[in-house]
Image (cartoon, rainbow, N blue to C red):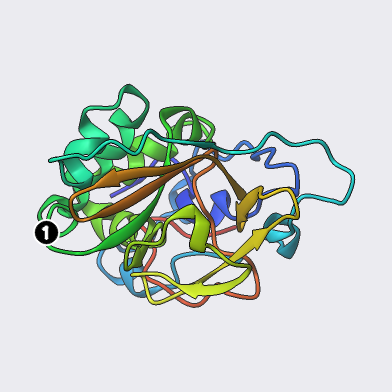
Amino acid sequence: MKTPIKLLTGILGLSALISFPAIAQEKTENSVKDPVNGATESMVESAPDSLSKPVQEGEKVEMPATADTESTTSNLVEQAASNDQFQTLVKAIEAAGLTETLAGEGPYTVFAPTDDAFAALPANTLDSLLQPENKEVLVKLLKYHVVSGAVPSSEIQSGDIITMAGKAVTVHVGEDGNVNVNNAQVTQADIEATNGIMHVVNHVILPSRSHAQSEPKPTGVRPN
């Protein structure tokens, strides 16, 4: 079965400015491989290390806003569903079959990409990720945004942390308190839930070259 793009292999060949390449190109017949055997190949090529570099010294950034700290009776999934900027994330969580997990006991810390963050992915990427045949890839990608334990912004420190995907992300906390996670920046912190906490990020978090490892890739495509 064809997929319209070279999905995450193409996503991770990004520039340091997150200017995504055009990867929604027509596939020739010899670019398609067996849809079953194709799933055993590595999921992604690593992104440039420059993606995970912190904001450069002297660069003007805005401090991440902190959410109101009123008590809540909503779990992480319910919190996301009630927030207009997370509708794509909620749809992806459902497609990945992670609703029960992220609504469960936890606690979890979720670096939550906004709808605009998902919209910044290359054309057709999101649609392909939501297809049933690419569920495993979607699960891995979403788990890359989740960390065990509830970590408020006041406790976030620079360094590598292991995500639920079993892979590390690099966190950098600037002197001004600005937080970057690989290629993404925290724009709003501390959205509390009964089973954890969410920090809003402005990009879908991608593995850096130093952290990327072999993973299953979407079926039916072969990198050029």
Q: How many marks?
A: 1
Locate residue 117, reporting x and y percent.
49, 35
Q: Amino acid at mark 1?
A: Gly
Locate residue 203, reporting x and y percent.
54, 42
User: Is 118 left or right of 91, judged from the image as shown?
Assistant: right
**As rendered, which of 106 and 36 lies closer to the eye?**
106
Q: Measured along the vertical axis of the image, is residue 105 above or below residue 67?
A: below
Which quarter of the figure has residue 125?
Answer: top left
Q: Measured along the vertical axis of the image, is residue 84 above or below residue 210?
A: above
Q: Residue at x 29, y 27 (%)?
A: 83
Element type where label 1 sits in the image: loop
Q: Residue at x 87, y 51 (%)?
A: 57
Q: Residue at x 41, y 57 (%)?
A: 145
Q: Measured along the vertical axis of the image, is residue 78 above or below residue 137?
A: above
Which quarter of the figure has residue 39?
Answer: bottom left
Q: Measured along the vertical axis of the image, is residue 156 above or below residue 89?
A: below
Disc 1 target residue: 104
The answer to whether residue 219 shows anywhere in this view is no
Q: Residues within 10 Å of mark 1 (few under 14, many from 20)?
A: some
**As rendered, which of 70 and 17 lies closer to the eye?**
70
Locate residue 40, reporting x and y percent.
34, 74
Q: Residue furthest front?
A: 70
User: Is 25 left or right of 52, judged from the image as shown?
Assistant: left
Q: Residue furthest top?
A: 84
Q: Residue furthest right?
A: 58
The answer to whether residue 209 shows anywhere in this view is yes
Locate residue 80, reporting x and y percent.
26, 36
- The C terminus: image quadrant: bottom right
**As rendered, which of 196 and 162 lies closer to the eye?**
196
Q: Residue at x 33, y 70 (%)?
A: 164
